[in-house]
Structure formats: C-alpha cells, structure tokens
Image (spheres, rainbow, N blue to C red):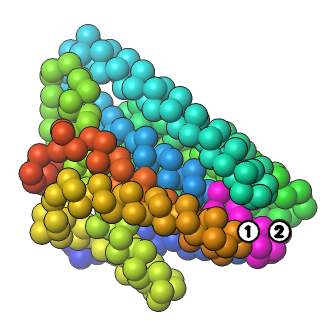
Amino acid sequence: MIRAHRIKDLLRREYLPMAATIAMWAAVVAAIGHADTARLLASTVFVRAIQLLTKMSTATSLKQRMGAPPEIRSQAKHFAINLQLGCLAGALVLIALLTEGMKAMGQHQIAAFLPFIALGMPARYLREADVRSVSPNSRLALTVSGLAIALIGWAAGWQLAYFGLAFGLREWAAYAILRWWPRPPRPSKIEVVEPLHFEEIARRTSIIGRQLLTYRLTKSMLTIFGPFGTAAARTGRGLNLHKKIEPYMPHHFGSFLLVSVGLLGASLFLALRSGEPAAMVGSAGLAQIGGAISNVVLLWRYLPTRGRDVEAEDDDDE
C-alpha cells in the first residue's frame, strides 16, 4: 500500500506535470517556431529567476496557524500579505530593469515577452499568502493550465506577443483552480499559536531554499540526458532525496556567495557574448540557479546549521 501510494503521488506531483510541460512547449513550437520558442522559454526562466530571488515562504506558516485564535490568524494573514506585496514590488522593479537591459543588448523580443509574463507574478505571490491555495497539486494545476492556454493559442493562431500573455494567464488560472477547488485546506502537522514574525519566515525560506538547491543543481546536470534526466531529477524530488542529501552539502557563506556571484556573472557574460536564442536559454538557466542561491545568501543570518526540522513545502519549479 505504501509503494502504491508513493507511485500515485509521483504520478500526480511529478510525472503528469512533466508530461503537461513537454506537451505545452511542443504546442508553442508548433505555433511560433523554434527560435521564438527559445526566446519565450528564456523570458519565462528569467522571470522565474527573479521570483526565486525574491521568494519568501509564508504559506506553511499560515497553515500552522489554522487552529490558532482568530486574532493570531488575522495577524498572520495580514503580515503574510504585506510581506508578499513587498516582495512583488521588488520583483516588478527587477523585471523593469531586466526589460531595459534586454533592450540594451538588442534582445527586443525577450524584452517584449517579459512584461506579459510578469502579469502572472501577482498570482504567484498571492498564493503564498492564501492558505486555501496551498496544495500538492500546484504543479499539476500550473502545467495543465499552461497546456490548455497554449493549445487555445495554437488553434486560434495567436500572434507572437500573445503567447507571452498566455504564460502570465496560466498563473492566474492555476491560482483560481487551487483557490476555489471544492476541498478544505489540509491542516498542518505542527500547530502554532504565536504571532507571525519576519524571523520565522526568513528562517523557513532559507532552509527550504537551501534544500531545494540540491534538486535544482541535480536537474541542471541531468538535462544532458534529456527527458530521462528530468524524470530522474523529478523522481528524486518526489522522494524527498534532496532533503536527505542536503545536510551533507557544504554549508559555508563564502562558498554560497561566490557561487551565486559566479553564476549571475556567467549568465550576463553568455547573454552578452552570444545573444543567440539557445544561448539566452542557457543564460536564463544560470540566472535562475544564481537567483535561488542569492535568496539563501540574503537570508543567511537566519539560517541554522542544519534544517531538518522544517515542514515540507511544495515547489512550483517546472
């Protein structure tokens, strides 16, 4: 029974989202061609890099207070919303700077995609402050929404810019599905009756960010094996192998800082050196990992030596 449940869980949380993602990008390629699809992919990953850089994990803390007195729940909700709005404001500023940077590099198509994709960013941040949208089906809802919108765009013969809008709309579609799906939110295994403070959020965010770095680095290395490598990385995430490996990884501020600066510098160098669509995808991938590591670096002062005592949290990484 345990094995059957684990296989079912992997299908729902990893393999079905992966299949939907592959089908979505296949539909986009059929609609706009390989080169523009690569530019759209680069734009999407650049936006994801900024989201990872500005990410603050508040959803689990809200779940832990579902059984708390009303005044505690209200304080936690308002604190989470204000924090997420602040993160969103910072992210939008970075999107504006990135857009101008892409224009300066001559990447006008990527610069045109970015604002459309960024339209979905408020939904991503609002989900972190809405306990009803916390679901193990988040990746499935996001990828299926993206596939449905991409198929509609392909069938309707959308112009190029509209596909950027589609990637923004899928965030709102996924949020609506998770928010209003007729099911009560699952209570947390850990109950908290204290007010929510920044230190708690920063600690949780830094621990989860460091744990997920193992998955992201493994996924990047396994991409040379194509879909099989991606499936292997997702299987490891579904089995929480990244959490088991993470305590044995290096835990030094200097190394994290050096790697983050190196990856962001390499991303900039690759974008300036080539500028070809494939190179921009590579640049965005480096920026995404660099953004995730930079998030941990910025919150390093709140990071304990080891972080196994944090409740698991789903990640929307596709």
Considering the numbered disc 1 on the image, is that residue within a helix, a strand or a loop?
A: helix
- Name the residue type under label 1: Thr
Q: Residue at x 33, y 35 (%)?
A: 58
Res 13 → quadrant: bottom left
- Of residues 298 and 22, the one nearer the viewer is 298
Within 10 Å of the Cα at label 1, are there few (<14), some (14-19), or many (20+) other Cα atoms? many
Total tally of numbered discs in the picture:
2
Give coordinates of residue 233: x percent, y percent: 37, 76
Considering the numbered disc 2 on the image, is that residue within a helix, a strand or a loop?
A: helix
Give coordinates of residue 18: x percent, y percent: 51, 71
Residue 37: mark in rendering: 1
- Is 157 one of the magenta-colored residues? no
Within 10 Å of the Cα at label 2, are there few (<14), some (14-19), or many (20+) other Cα atoms? some
Residue 268: mark in rendering: none
Res 77 → quadrant: top left
Decide: is 192 above or below 265.
Answer: above
Q: Is residue 180 visible?
A: no
Residue at numbered disc 2? 32
Q: Residue at x 43, y 53 (%)?
A: 291
- C-alpha gap between disc 1 and disc 2: 6 Å
Q: Residue at x 13, y 51 (%)?
A: 307
Magenta span: predominant SS is helix
Q: Residue at x 38, y 17 (%)?
A: 78
- Name the residue type under label 2: Ile
Give coordinates of residue 6: x percent, y percent: 28, 71
Span shown in magenta:
28-43
Decide: is 2 above or below 213.
Answer: below
Res 97 → quadrant: top right
Q: Is residue 109 visible?
A: yes
Tell me the quadrant of the picture where the N terminus can be found. bottom left
- Nearest to N terminus: mark 1 or mark 2: 2
- Of residues 241 and 147, the one nearer the viewer is 241
